[in-house]
Amino acid sequence: MPIQAIEPKRLYRQISEQLRTLIQRGEFPVGSRLPAERDLAEKLGVSRPSLREALIALEVEGYIEVRMGSGIYVCEPPSNQPGHDLDAEEGPLELIQARAVLEGEVAALAAKTGRKAQFDAVEEAIDAMEADADAGVKPLETDRLFHIRVAEATGNSVLVGTVRRLNDLRLGPLYDQLHSHFETEDTWRQAIEEHREVLAALRAKDPVKARAAMRRHMDIAYKRMTATLTPTPKPKPAVKAVRAAARKPAVPVKRVKKLG
C-alpha cells in the first residue's frame, strides 16, 4: 500500500466526522433532534465552542438543520453531488479569538502612529457601514473595510496584509452560516457603535483605550456567537427523578482525541 502523508485535522472536523458517521449509521434518525449542545460536548469531551463549529460544519454539509429556539434536527442525507469542501476552512470561533489578539494590538499601534487623514478614512468606513445598515444591506464589506483602515493607520504593510487575510476568511461558508444564526439589524447597529468607540480612542491617540475598545468589540462578537443555539428548558423538580429513571442508554459516542 502506498504511503500517504499524515494530515492533522482540526478539532471541529474530528467532531463533525464522528457525528456524521453516527447520523449515516442511523444512530440519529432523520427528523430526530440531537442532544443538547451541553450534553454532546460532555459526551465527546470537547468544549462547547469546538462542538459549535462542528455542528455548523454539519449544517453547511446538509446533515442537520438548526432551528433557533427549537433544536438541532437531522436532515435527509445529502445527495452525492459535491458540496462545500471544508477541509481548509478555519473554525470561525478560533478566527474571532485570533483576530481579538491581533487587532487589539493593531489598534494600539494605530493610535500611536496614525495620522488624522488615516483616522478620517476609518470614520469614512464606519459611515459607509451605517449607510449600508440604513439601506437594509448587510454591511459585511464595509465592516471589513473598517478593520483594514485601522490596520493601515499603523503604517505596517505586514499587519495590513494579515488583517486583510483574517477578515477575508470571514467570507467562508462556516463563518457565514454561524453568523446567520445571530446576525440582526440590532447586532450590526451595536457593532457600528463599538467601531465608533475604537475611532474615538484612535483620535485621542490613546493606545490603551484603543486596544481595550477593539478587544471589547471582538469579545462581544465571540460571546454572541457562542450563545446557546437552542436553549433547553429546565425540567420541573418534580419530574427530574422520573426522567432520570426512564432515561434510555445514551447513543454511543467516543471522546474525541485531540491531535497535536
Image: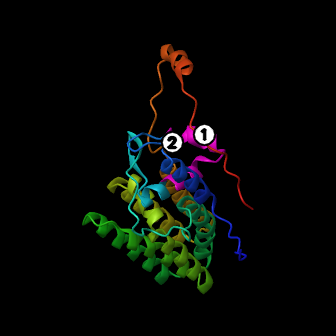
Q: Residue sitting at 36 percent across and 58 percent down?
A: 189
Predominant SS along the magenta part = helix
Q: Is residue 114 among the parts visible in the rendering?
A: no
Q: Nearer the viewer, residue 159 or 201?
A: 159
Q: Residue at x 58, y 73 (%)?
A: 111
Q: Is residue 252 found left or right of 132 in the rendered image? A: right
The answer to whether one can see residue 45 in this image is yes
Q: Answer yes or no: do the residues labelled 2 and 1 have beta carbons within 8 Å?
A: yes
Compared with 10, 251 (above or below) is above
Viewer-proximal residue, 119 or 79? 79
Instruction: From the top left corner, tell me how far across and down residue 86 is, in percent.
Output: 51, 67
- For the C terminus, the quadrant is bottom right
Q: Which residues are magenta?
A: 35-55
Residue 42 lies in the magenta stretch: yes
Check disc 1 and report the residue beneath it.
252
Q: Which residue is mark 2?
A: 27
Label 1's element? loop
Q: Who comes first in sequence, dot 2 or dot 1?
A: 2
Disc 2 from disc 1: Cα separation: 9 Å
